[in-house]
Amino acid sequence: MIHHLKDLSGGFDDHADVIVVGSGAGGAVAARNFAAAGLRTVVLEAGPQIAPEDMTRDGPGFMSQYMWDGGLRIIQAKSPVPIMQGRCLGGSTVMNSAIMLKIPDWVRQDWSRSNGLHWLEGPELDAAFERIFEGTRTAPTPMSVMGPRNRVVQKALAAAGQPGKALPRAVHNCEGCADCLVGCASGAKQSTDRSYIPYAVKDGARVYTCAHVENIEMEGTRAVGVTGRVVDPRGRRSVGTFHVRAPRIVLAAGVMNTPVILQRSGINPRGRIGATLNVHLTGGVIARMEERVDPWIGATQGWGAISEDIRGMKFESLWAPPGLLLAKWGGMGEAFLRELSEIKYMAVIAIVYRGKCSGSVKADRHGRPNMKFQVPDFEARNVFRGMKMAADGFLDVGAQYVSTGTMPGVPSKLRNKRDTEHLLSSKLGAKHMMMTGNHAFGSCRMSASESEGPVDPSGAVRGVEGVYICDTSIFPSPTAVNPQATCMAMADVLTRQIAARA
């Protein structure tokens, strides 16, 4: 059963065998596994369930309603890094592009051998990936829904020496409307509110939306339940409190909220909770093509390529509602209006890079996550190098000009490869990056070593009994690809083992 705000005014109390905090990639898989195993399962989701009619092309309005901090959550860095994270049933799987890629073998081996997570190289994870791909109906994006924008990106990447492929996505019967970032009104995207939560509910799980967990209740070193507030998503006003008791708490609240819940609960083994935040570095270029592209037609992110020149870098096509995209590339106000007529000629290549960076997450005095992140200049320059490759590729296939946004010493419109050379300037560094941090990891790192990670190889938080984590918080480092499939597969392995022991 799914409980909504109208059912919960005044608060509630419940009890279970296991509590799952969060309903995104990790939490939904956990809920399905626990319910299927016959455990009384309660899922607590801080946001509401989104109806298809609320999935409109009003990007800013959608963000303000269904993302943490109204879509304005910021990581403090040399240049502030916005990070968009879903606060709704299904979490960020509702508003991402549904890209489902296995973790690269070289990253998987690094996690196994450097962090003692040897089970990652075993057959359990491979079997989990297959279950996840089947459960989300993952398949390569059909060429029939690519649209001209993805095809332009395909040609540009090939010209840049980065041969790619149709990206596998958790979508069935995609209509190619390019609206993934504001949900999927047609129901084609297999976000976890559609693909996993219904099965958990069918097997008896009780799901509470608008239920913001704040603390884990402890008796000595053993977890016995959680407490929190029922929050109206409109205005974020508290309308009640809740208390749920259970001997097992599985946190899947996200890489920012999971460490905050633990810190607020006084759980912080060796001070390592929240001490190791990492984020994929990102960049991108937008091209004004000679021929009309109509970029709002076609899969949001249908084509991509793994770089053969820069290890850990991925290129991918991208689109978003103009109110979001052109605030970065085309300015705001009058500048935005001047660029508006050009939209129909535009195509975008986004860059994701597994750089060596460091950061942290700490609960502030109001109980909200305070994130800090440091990017070395040499890693930022790798992103700029990737941007030059993408820009050159666009120019090679007929772009009139390419824009990177405002960067000192870089022409606002790159019209030839002499212009793109400015992206390799040694004067550019981390403070000049205009990135988003939507792929975040590692705030509660998993490791066989107690000094390296607060979470052991079984997903259990060290120093307490009955507390587990199954979201990207436990990743030892970035994945170099979109993390959803890896998060779901790891959660599948870990929660099946927890259920078996229970």
Image (cartoon, rainbow, N blue to C red):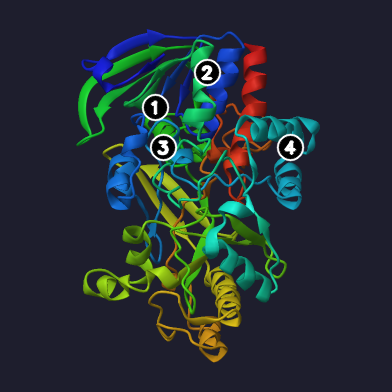
Separation of residues labelled 3 and 4 (CA atoms)? 25 Å
Q: Could you tell which of marks 3 and 1 lies nearer the N-terminus? A: 1
* Secondary structure type for disc 1: loop
Q: Position of residue 246 (x, y in %)?
A: 46, 12
- From the image, state whether disc 1 or disc 4 is nearer to you: 1
Pointer 2 with pointer 4, Cβ within 8 A: no
Which residue is tagged 1? 45
In this view, 197 is above or below 375 = above
Q: Position of residue 196 (x, y in %)?
A: 54, 26
Q: Could you tell which of marks 2 and 1 lies nearer the N-terminus? A: 1
Residue 17, can we see it?
yes
Which residue is tagged 4? 120
Q: Position of residue 106 (x, y in %)?
A: 75, 52
Q: Residue at x 46, y 53 (%)?
A: 178
Q: Residue at x 43, y 44 (%)?
A: 95
Viewer-proximal residue among 289 and 287: 289
Viewer-proximal residue among 403 and 259: 403
